[in-house]
Image: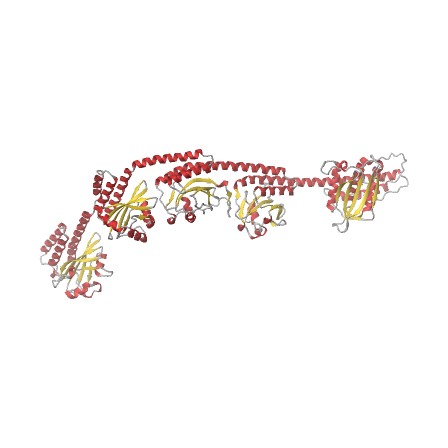
Amino acid sequence: MGQQHLQPDNENQLVALGRILQTLREEENAEVLIETTLDYLANEFDYRLIWIGLYDRLDHRLVGKGGITPTGDITFLKQRFNLSSGDLLEQVVIEQRPVGVPDLQQELRAGDWRRAAQEFGIQGTIVFPLRYKDRCFGVVLLGSDQWGFSPRPAEKAQLSLVLGGLAAALYQIEADWQRTATKRPDQHLFQVLDELLELPSLTLRLEAVVRMTQEFVAPTRTNLYWYSPERRYFWHRMGNRQSLARLAESRTTTAGLKVAEANDFYQALAAGQMVAIGAGRSLLKPESIERLLARLRTRSLLAAPIQVNGELLGFLAVEDSEPRIWEQGETSYVRATAQLIALVQGNEELEATLEQAQKDTHFTAEIAQAIARSHDTPTALKECADLLGDRLDAERFLVLQENALGEFTLVFGTQPPNRRSLTTSLAPLSAEDRQLFKGSDAIALEDLDLEWRLTPWRKVLIQLGVRSALLISLGQLNLSSQPLKIDNSNQEGQTEGLLLLLLGHSAPRTWNHTQRELLSIAVQQMSLLFTVDQLQENARLSLLAHQTLQAGLSTLQEAPLDLPLFDHTWVQYLATLMECPLAVLLSWTPESTSASVAAVVAEPRFSFPPDLAIPVASNSLIQEVLATNSFLCRPLTALDASTRKWLSSPGIGQVLAIALHTGVKPTTGILLLADHEKRQWPWHLLLPLETLTTQFTWLRHYRHRLSLHAQDSGNLQILNWYKHRCLEALYHSVVQSVRTLLVEPGTSLPNTQDFNQDTLGDFGEINATPTLDSGQPLRSISRQPLLHQLEQTLTLLTPVLKKEQWQLQVNLRPVPLSHLLKRSLRCVEPLYHQRQIMRKVHNLGNQSIYCDALKLECILFELLITACFHAPPGSWINLWCNPTPPDSSPALLELLITESGLLEDCLKTLAASPLAPSTLNLKICRDILSAWGGDLQFYPLKGDRFSSRLLLPLPK
């Protein structure tokens, strides 16, 4: 605009500006301020249109306060203008900065002002906000009949001072109004306290509190609700007198509120929170708010909990029939009043509380006496269950113990008559649920239908008729007394399990603080029962482990010396001790690459192939067991396919194995136990069994070495006997040759090819050492024939000296029996003649046998010598040759040597005196024959005779 819009006298302008600013500072009436501002704008500026509108924040609109128009009609300027998104006026309100419009008649965002501009002939327009401390109190619209005018800087400064002063004045007026309108709950509460001190009874005091709350907050009605924990129900205790009549009409016959109808409302009150429902937002769920307001027949609610020692006694409610925003002062007052009611109620019930405390003290003493006078844990638990049931109004008393699988089994329980008992284990708890029992506080479940805790148990408990429960931990027990838990990765799991006490009720209810405290005190005493039981159980298991160790050592000590029988005895002991249907010992040698079955004990359903050859290096189960120093437990599903092939019996579901470690030698065996899938191995037996397995391993290793030494010793005994007989034959052959050459004239030298046909005998018994002094004249011979004879004789012993130094070498071939038998009889002829024993051979024939000729000659000589020494002088010795039946397998020739002596005198048993020369020699003969497929047996005959039965294999 131009200069013509200002007064010509600048001094008058400054005076007018100072006057209006002073008025804005001092005036407290908003209407006067607006009128003064309009007069100033009309007098100091030449605008055709001036309008002031105040901003209504609740309805988001501008309320016209008047102004100036070219026509003088200000009706349009008194209207209310709703603000919508994109409007020109909303832009000014939100952005709080002036906006200029070149032509208001053409401005699409002007709304109704566009039409008014056409009517009033307004074009150039500027809209100023009434802004103070970032708050917009309204707008000022200044319009001109010129297109696109813009105020000069001086005019803008002048307008800014005036309009800013108006906004500051409006801000101050609103602040003063809010300050005077705010309620002072502290002052009113002092009045309540003064009045309560003068009232004699609890009822009158509660009525006064409700009445004064109604006066301060001024709702439609004020009510006091009391809580019944047993029924989980809020009952209407009292309300303000003015609303009692209407309340009686509007309430149903069951005045009050069930917890099930508004559970989150109850949870908020129990947590000590205020609940405000009105025009603003609420913490409750929408569906819960709807049910609660419908039940209380109200549209706004402000409820404060009444609590004593953390227990909910009820709530104080102020209710309004219209949506209402509750002020901070009202909320504080209602909360303080509710706490005041709790204080009044607590003082009123002090005597009752003291009396109840005495009863509770006596109750804890009764629990201690019940535990002390009981002789066993079930009796003590029964008495504790009766006491707790009567005091806490509990219908079920369940003691639950966690096992190694994480499940909870019933240890002790009581339930009402004709009600189902808990027969199955409860599912394992989640990590979150286990955290609930870390402390010593009881966990209250008021309504299982609405609980999110202990979800895995809810279904089972509801089926038992339990709708509310009180749980607490009795402590943690060692799981070492329980069966070993199967683990697919390792057998190290949790070693302690929870022991829980559950009190149940058939209806939803609240367990108050006193009840939870009493249960905690009782549980501290009851836990001693289980601690003592645990100690006794540990002692019993320790004794059982000690007895197992003793019995196992005795079994190892008394086991047979024979290694296969020793293995089988130990495997049988393990199967019996562990009550296991399959026990197997797999063994191999350090040089072998495959494991075989050394011993197996199996039930028919758990059969095991005895002829296995399991590759040690590539079998995952064997390698995993070898890498473990203790027992290893694996389910069948965790084993590879190659292992499941030889563990294919339908009854096998899991295996328990341990390696036979010696520590200094390569491990060459494992013990394997198998059972069904759900078998739980006794943990307390595994530790002593590990020790016994170590003892078995070392003893087995020792007996294996002892067996090898015994075998080597037996081989050396056989070799010694055989070489001794060969040495005797050599000695006798040399002496006989020399005697023949030097004593008997005309006798030719014996044929050296028949060296092994010469006599074999015990010359200590047959003759004294031969001499050349026979009474006959010696004849002279050349040395050359004699040396040649000796050389040929020694040559025949070369295979014995070179090939049989430490072990016999068997050279089997067909040999005529008659030829060998005649030479053997000729060898013992001098002894038989000396003892006047006659002999006779029956059915000799021309039968050939398959044998080592030299060794069989030694055996025949040994048998003939034995028969000769034990036959009475002047008796007969008969030799019978009888082929076995043609259909027998293998084909054998039977040679019987019978004599008239007693069998007991000849040979008690081969084991009666293992160091006796004759017994040992005969045992050696039998062992040599067994290696060829023959045998040597002794039988008693009638008439004080016995028979030596020699079975010789026939040529194939």
For the N terminus, give its image quadrant: bottom left
Identify the coloring.
secondary structure
414 displayed left or right of 802:
left
Closer to us: 124 or 171: 171
Q: How many labels does the image show?
A: 0
Q: Quadrant of residue 737?
A: top right
Q: Position of residue 6 (x, y in %)?
A: 11, 59
Q: Judge whether 181 appears above or below 118 on screen.
A: above
20 displayed left or right of 524:
left
Q: Quadrant of residue 657?
A: top right
409 displayed left or right of 507:
right
Closer to us: 943 or 270: 943
Q: Position of residue 206 (x, y in %)?
A: 25, 42
Q: Quadrant of residue 56?
A: bottom left
Q: Is residue 623 visible?
A: yes
Q: Where is residue 693 in the image (x, y as percent from the top left)?
A: 58, 41
Q: Judge whether 783 appears above or below 139 on screen.
A: above
Q: Is residue 719 visible?
A: no
Closer to us: 930 or 187: 187
Q: Position of residue 487 (x, y in %)?
A: 50, 47
Q: Judge whether 41 appears above or below 828 on screen.
A: below
